[in-house]
Each structure stands twice: as C-alpha cells, then as structure tokens.
Amino acid sequence: MSGKQRHSQALQDAVKEVLLRDWDPIGIGREDAEKDEYDAYVTRICALIVQRQSVEEVIDYLLWAETEQMGLQADVERARRVAGKLIQLV
C-alpha cells in the first residue's frame, strides 16, 4: 500500500470514527455489529473535506443524509458540531 493509500485509508477511518462517535443520528452507539452503518457517507465526506469545501457544504451533506436518506428530522446543531470536527481532520 502506497503512502497516499495509507493516508486515504487513515482519513476514511477518522471520518468513520467521527460519524460513529459524534454524529450517530440513529443512535447505534459503538455496537460492533453496526460499525458499518454510516460507511455509505464516508467517501463523499472525505471528498468534501479534501477538496476544502466549506463547513456549510459538509453541514448540508450531513443534514441531507439525516433527512433524505434516513427519514429523520434534521439536527442542525449536531451537524454543525460534527462538520467542524470533520473539517479539522485535514
């Protein structure tokens, strides 16, 4: 695995950790059986933060995932807090 691939995997792992620990809109916690629950969102979030998109872009994506994909009510404050943490990963 090249250095770039290792960096990419490390970023994906870090994003996944933030999503599980800090975002977790469906409340799965850290259950081993559910650790892949938010994997579908990791690649897009990584792209947003690597491309240095605004925190608002990341917030919008998280809110879209909550409302359009999961059918939940938006939690703007949580999305804002988590987006800030995600942006700091790069």
Image (spheres, grey):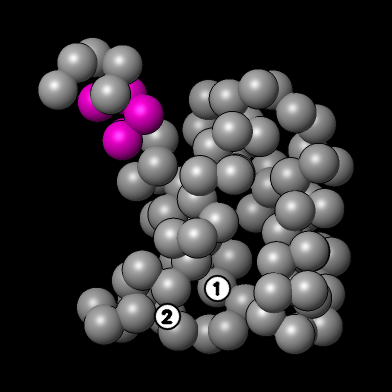
Residue of label 1? 24
Does the stretch in magenta take in 86?
no
Q: Nearer the viewer, residue 21 or 37?
A: 37
Q: Judging from the image, what secondary structure is the residue with disc 2 in?
A: loop
Task: Decide whether residue 9 is among the magenta residues.
Answer: yes
Tell me if I can see residue 1 in this picture: yes
| CA neighbours of label 1 inside 10 A, class few (<14), some (14 to 19), many (20+) | some
Name the quadrant containing residue 6: top left
Q: Which residues are magenta?
A: 6-10
Is residue 21 at least partly visible in the picture? no
Residue 74's place in the image compared with 7, above or below, is: below
Please name the amino acid that badge 2 sits on. Gly
What is the quadrant of the N terminus in the image? top left
Residue tagged 2: 29
Determine which quarter of the picture holds residue 66: bottom right
- Picture layout, residue 53 above or below residue 74: above
Task: Find the distance from the CA under tag 1 to the CA under tag 2.
Answer: 7 Å
Q: Amino acid at mark 1?
A: Asp
Residue 63: x and y in percent read 79, 64
The extreme top residue here reads 3
- The residue closer to the viewer here, 39 or 26, is 39
Question: Which circle marks residue 83 in the picture?
Answer: none
Contact? badges 1 and 2 (CB < 8 Å): yes
Q: Residue at x 71, y 59 (%)?
A: 62
- Magenta stretch, main secondary structure, is helix
Q: Earlier in the sequence, mark 1 or mark 2?
A: 1
